[in-house]
Image (cartoon, grey):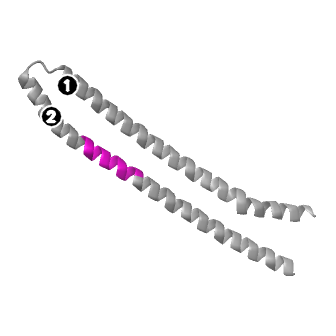
Amino acid sequence: MSTSSFDQAAQQFDSLFFGPARAYAALSLDYTEKLVAAQFDAVKAYSDLSLTQARTMLDVKDADGLRSYVEGQQKVAKDLSERLKGDAEKVVAMNQEFLQEGQKLVEESVKSASKATATSAKAATK
């Protein structure tokens, strides 16, 4: 097998297998990075809210303070539910984006493989 044939085979192998694998690995790393960042952001927000609520509870000294605290809990619960909904929507959007990008990679790989197979078949018939 000549050097040029070996180089061509290596190049085809890279374009058919290693290239798509690297692209998918990069896509997966980007997705993981975004997901971890979103999770850290959510954990920080929930932790801050919990600590704020604990500090507010420590400031309750009488019946009026307790009533005010309990009334404030309704707003906190509403804000928290909106935050949870937003976080869930963010993760769903990231998942959909990852899926779409993954499908594009598969389609590109199939096209590339088909093209390489056709090129190899033409070269073999000559």
Quickly name the residue at label 2: 72
In the image: residue 82, left or right of residue 74: right
Q: Residue at x 8, y 19 (%)?
A: 62
Asked if 32 appears above or below 14 in the picture, the reply is: above
Q: Residue at x 62, y 55 (%)?
A: 23
Asked if 57 appears above or below 5 in the picture, the reply is: above
Quickly name the residue at label 1: 56
Magenta-span inclusion, residue 125: no
Q: Main secondary structure of the magenta part?
A: helix
| Quarter that holds the C terminus | bottom right
Magenta-span inclusion, residue 87: yes
Q: How many marks?
A: 2
Q: Amino acid at mark 2?
A: Gly
Q: Residue at x 29, y 44 (%)?
A: 83
In 3D space, how far apart are the residues under numbered discs 1 and 2 (Cα atoms)? 10 Å
Highlighted range, magenta: 80-91
